[in-house]
Image (spheres, rainbow, N blue to C red):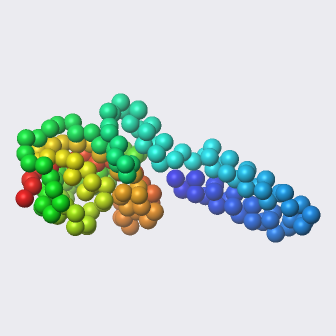
Amino acid sequence: MRRIVLFTLLILAFGCKNEGSQNPSQGGNNSNLKETLIKANQKVVLTEDEQINNLINRYGWKMEETGTGLRYFIYKKGSGIASQKGQKVKINYSVRLISGDIVYSSDKSGPKIFTIGSGGVESGLEEAILLMHQGDKAKLIIPSHLAFGLVGDDDKIPPKASLIYDVEILELD
């Protein structure tokens, strides 16, 4: 990821350097440079959506997609009540980056407990929990705009990171 950012910065720096030395009679070069940069970025950077779709296809996961871009697959149906906003939920979870690296898990930090709809967790996680029942186990892919966005979490999750959750609802109150 850092290579992509570095490459983009180099291209922009090169473009800015040439822009200042450009002869005013060569007005079309700015347009050509812009087109070249756009094409280079399209070739170098896969979009987040493409990365997510490639991951899903590689593993053969049969996931559903919500209107926000959240992907989910409930692979074990529980027999408990449906989750609702305002309920307190207790979950076991593991969080991976698209690279497969585990960044957080209930195995190390214990179950996560939060009130649905009150914030404090990724909006994509809350959205997914509202699609589940007590006892359900699901795999989720949360795109960065539903997770920690452009900045990451200032710890283990980098900027613009998609997250892969494995989650089980243990309790709903």
Q: Work out whether residue 53 can be spotted.
A: yes
Residue occupying the point 27% across, 39% down: 73
**Image spot of residue 19 (x, y percent):** 80, 65
Using residue 16 as the reference point, say whether residue 138 is left or right of it.
left
The quadrant holding residue 166 is top left
Decide which of 100, 140 is in the foreground and name it.
140
Q: Work out whether residue 102 can be spotted.
A: no
Residue occupying the point 81% across, 63% down: 18
**Image spot of residue 88 (x, y percent):** 12, 61
Residue occupying the point 54% across, 56% down: 2
Residue occupying the point 7% across, 41% down: 79
**Image spot of residue 37 (x, y percent):** 70, 53
The furthest residue to the bottom: 20
Quarter of the image containing the C terminus? Answer: bottom left
Above or below — where is 28 with respect to 23?
A: above
**Image spot of residue 147 (x, y percent):** 36, 58
Decide which of 39, 106 is in the foreground and name it.
39
The quadrant holding residue 75 is top left
The furthest residue to the front: 67
Using residue 135 as the reference point, say whether residue 29 is left or right of it.
right
Above or below — where is 62 with respect to 70?
A: above
Using residue 155 as the reference point, say whether residue 135 is left or right of it.
left
Tell how many labels.
0
